[in-house]
Image (cartoon, helix red, strand yellow):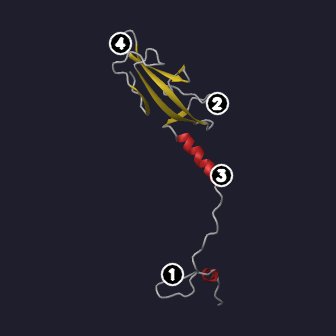
Amino acid sequence: MRDVPVLRTSGHAGAGMSEIAGHPGATAVVNESYSFACMRCGHGWEQSYEIEHHIDGDGREFVRYMVDGRVVPSPLSRPACANCDHHVVRIMRPGRVAATRDAAHRQHSTPPAGPVEAPAARTAQGPGEEHHWHLADLLHVFQRKAS
């Protein structure tokens, strides 16, 4: 059986169980969620899967990915963008797309900050303090001396 990262579990452990209610033939059911981003068009989405663990007639383990009660291909094999059908898709941990959308929404809906207080200007220059340059101080090096 291929190792599948377990991100969220449903608590249905298959130890000693031949079937799990609602999942005929499954010895264990694990819930996993992923975030996806298309590298071609930028479309982002999230999907949750029920992964049913089964044992075939020869005693080998296999898994079935389910979405809304339908068997779907593994999202780890060759995901396709639902927007442009491109197969260069980045798979990330769950919540990444939602977090990015929330951040973008907050950026556009946050009102601008109120007035910002500027520090008071220095009036006297004591020993060891930085010299405040004026434009005339910088331009004097370009002036010609009369000969």
Q: In 3D space, how far apart are the residues under numbered discs 3 and 1 (Cα atoms)?
A: 40 Å
User: Where is residue 128 shown, x and y percent of the image?
Assistant: 46, 85
| Residue 84 badge | 2
Q: Is residue 80 above or below residue 70?
A: below
Mark 4 vs mark 2: which is more N-terminal?
4
Mark 4 vs mark 1: which is more N-terminal?
4
The mark closer to the camera, 3 or 1, is 3
Amino acid tagged 4: Gly
The C terminus - image quarter: bottom right
Position of 84 with respect to 90 (left or right) is right
The residue carrying mark 3 is 108
Q: In 3D space, how far apart are the residues under numbered discs 2 and 3 (Cα atoms)?
A: 27 Å
User: Is the residue under label 2 in contact with that under label 4 (CB below 8 Å)?
Assistant: no
Q: Is residue 128 above or below residue 104?
A: below
Amino acid tagged 1: Glu
- The residue most toward the front is 21
Mark 2 vs mark 3: which is more N-terminal?
2
User: Where is residue 16 shown, x and y percent of the image?
Assistant: 33, 18
Answer with the quarter of the image where residue 63 lies.
Answer: top left
Q: In 3D space, how far apart are the residues under numbered discs 1 and 2 (Cα atoms)?
A: 59 Å
| Residue 59 badge | 4
Q: In 3D space, how far apart are the residues under numbered discs 4 and 3 (Cα atoms)?
A: 55 Å
